[in-house]
Amino acid sequence: MPIIITLVISVFLILLSWTWHNLGNIEKSKKVAIIIVLLLLIYIITLIIFNISQKDILYEIQDEKELIKNVFVLLFTLVNGIIVMPMICKTINGVFEKETKKENATTKIMIILVIFIILLFLECGYFKSIQQGILNMLAIKK
């Protein structure tokens, strides 16, 4: 578990610094608000995908289910954040700096979101597979 915690903290710090940097000269309060909103949205989306993936999986012990859910949702929220947040924030910064037109920014963000949705379908299958693998390992242990 200490390795997982170290990994989560490291990925979180990388995500925050990369996203902060990509927001450029935007006010600090707006940067914080943008980062919080994006993280919450990605967390909710990741939680929904995880819940969809565990629909057909039966856990004998509820504590196992909660631990697996918490670890994977947290870790994949950060991974998903690294995939989309810096690009979205770079686009937002382009609009604030008047380097990018709003129409172009909207198109870029839509492309990022389409790619993200495709990745979420793959992630859902991965979640299902990894949960089943963990349950199989726990069954062998017993």
Image (spheres, rainbow, N blue to C red):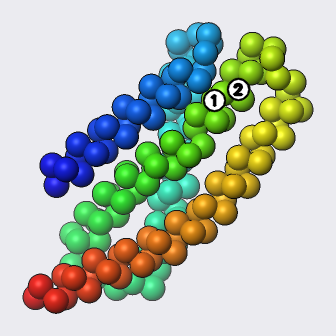
Determine the residue positioned at 19% across, 50% down. Answer: 3
User: Is residue 110 toward the left or the right of residue 80 in the image?
Assistant: right
Cβ atoms under marks 2 and 1 closer than 8 Å: yes
Work out whether residue 24 can be spotted.
yes
Disc 1 marks a residue whose amino acid type is: Cys
Q: Amino acid at mark 2?
A: Ile
User: Local crowd at mark 2 within 10 Å, few (<14), some, or many (≥20)?
Assistant: many
Using the numbered discs, state the Cα–Cα distance from disc 2 to disc 1 in whole angstroms.
5 Å
Residue 60 visible from this viewpoint: no
Image quadrant for the C terminus? bottom left
In this rendering, is residue 5 above or below 87?
below
Task: Name the residue: 57% across, 69% down.
Answer: 122
Question: Which numbered circle lies on residue 89?
Answer: 1
Q: Residues within 10 Å of mark 1 (few under 14, many from 20)?
A: many
Q: Give coordinates of residue 41: x percent, y percent.
A: 56, 45
Disc 2 element: helix
In the displayed structure, would residue 58 be above or below residue 84?
below
Q: Is residue 57 left or right of residue 83?
A: left
Quadrant assignment for the N terminus: bottom left
Label 2 belongs to which residue?
92
The image shows residue 5 at horizontal and vertical percentages of 23, 46
> How many numbered marks, from 0 up?
2
Q: Residue 57: image x %, image y %?
A: 39, 84
Which quarter of the figure has residue 38? top right
Is 116 placed above or below 133 here?
above
Give the quarter of the image for residue 33.
Answer: top right
Disc 1 secondary structure class? helix
Question: Residue 61: which quarter of the image?
Answer: bottom left
